[in-house]
Amino acid sequence: MAAHLYKTGDMVVLKDGPVRLSRSVGVCKVLATLPEQQGTRRYRVRFESEGFDRSIAEDEIDRDRSPRSGSGLDTKKPAGSWLTPGGPA
């Protein structure tokens, strides 16, 4: 089992295809890496324009337009956790 190419927080672009809806075009954020299914690495992603998550296969990601983890499309620093160990400060 190979490691996932993308990590949580990475911004990726999906390949164009006949099933893609115009409202889901563009960059989406990787929310989680999922277990392999039938030998394919999978991710949970969300488009900013949608109110739900999608499960996608790694081969649905356009690698030419999606930098590998660490080089990112998004230069914003990820937000910290809302959960604070030990209670409020």
Image: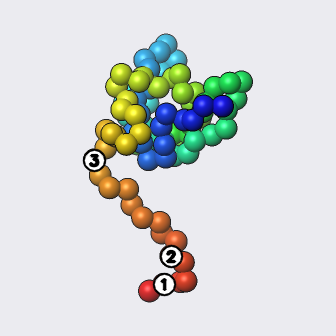
Residue for point 41% across, 39% down: 69
Q: Residue at x 55, y 83 (%)?
A: 86
How far is mark 3 from mark 1, CA to CA?
Answer: 29 Å
Q: Which residue is label 3 attached to?
A: 75
Asked which secondary structure carries label 2, the reply is loop
Question: Residue 84 shows which numbered tag?
Answer: 2
Q: Is residue 85 above or below residue 62?
A: below
Tell whether 65 sits left or right of 4: left
Q: What type is the residue that disc 1 sits on?
A: Pro
Q: Is the Cβ of the residue at disc 1 closer than 8 Å to that at disc 2? A: yes
Element carrying mark 1: loop
The residue depicted at 42 percent of the width and 64 percent of the height is: 80
Q: Looking at the picture, how far across and down is residue 71, in whole percent? A: 33, 39
- In the picture of the structure, the residue carrying the numbered disc 1 is 88
Residue type of the residue flagged with mark 2: Thr
Q: Residue 43 versus residue 2: which sits nearer the camera?
A: 2
Horizontal placement of 55 versus 5: left or right? Answer: right
Asked if residue 44 shows in the view, the reply is yes
Q: In whole angstroms, how far apart are the C-alphas of marks 1 and 2? A: 7 Å
Could you tell me residue 68's position as x and y percent?
40, 34
Could you say which is closer to the camera, residue 38 or residue 25? 38
